[in-house]
Image: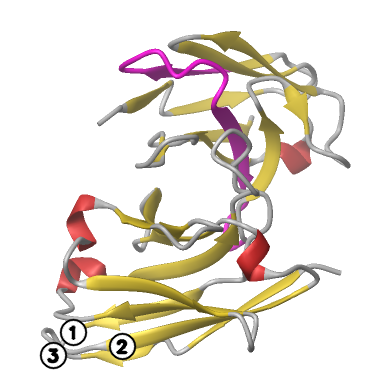
Amino acid sequence: DIQMTQSPSSLSASVGDRVTITCRASQDISHYLAWYQQKPGKVPKLLIYAVSTLQSGVPSRFSGSGSGTDFTLTISSLQPEDVATYYCLKYGDVPFTFGPGTKVDVK
Amino acid sequence: EVQLVESGGGLIQPGGSLRLSCAVSGFTVSSNYMTWVRQAPGKGLEWVSIIYRGGARYYADPVKGRFTISRDTSENTVHLQMNSLRAEDTAVYYCARAGINVWDNWIDFWGQGILVTVSS
């Protein structure tokens, strides 16, 4: 099965900072990569699918890139409401696999 | 409006069984891939099971042989039958939609989640 890793596991940044989260697959997963935001006590929310397609209604400060095994979620200008844990998801063939998550805090 | 509403959770003893239900509105379960994802307290997201439009069913290794996913098209509902429950199955269980084919099956809509606690 394909394993997904994320780095860093947590980060703290200032409002307005550019934040980058990395997700790595143990094998080539083509474009079958999505990103989710989960705020404390809340349901996960889809941000990006197919590596770089922004889900409707998601602010444009969120972007995704990558291919094959290495992927990136970027928040271009961190906002206080972006405090959350971010997960990548490998979909397509089963099993689906989530990354372990990256917790983002605001300094 | 799309809504997924889980029910059937609660406290159950180890070795016991529980059946979760997910009532769906806003789309037809038989025309979509439907999946269950769980989250143990303080932990990350873990994929559990999926049922394809054609009826094929798949499971994560930790639940294979113990959990069964099914759907009721007349009720537009998805179920997760959980048998031989273990303490490590304690989690919030989310019902979710996962697209309409294997090339576009990212998870887009989620239920609010239901807590299952396995403890004596």
Residue underneath mark 3: B120
Between the residue at mark 3 and the residue at mark 1, the CA separation in whole angstroms equals 4 Å
Residue at label 1? B119
Which kind of residue does numbered mark 2 sit on? Leu
- Residue A41 lies, with reference to residue B72, above or below; the image says above
Tag 1: amino acid: Ser
Q: How many marks?
A: 3
Marks 3/2: CA–CA distance? 15 Å
The answer to whether the residues at label 3 and label 2 have Cβ atoms under 8 Å apart is no
User: SS class of the residue under badge 3?
Assistant: loop
Q: Nearer the viewer, residue B9 or A105?
A: B9
Residue B97, given in percent of the width and then of the height, sits at 62, 58
SS at badge 2 = strand
Does label 3 or label 2 sit earlier along the sequence?
Answer: 2
Asked whether B120 falls inside the magenta stretch, the response is no
Q: In x, y percent, where is residue A41?
A: 57, 63
Q: Residue at x 42, y 36 (%)?
A: A93
Q: Between A80 and A5, which is closer to the camera in this rendering? A: A5
Type of amino acid under label 3: Ser
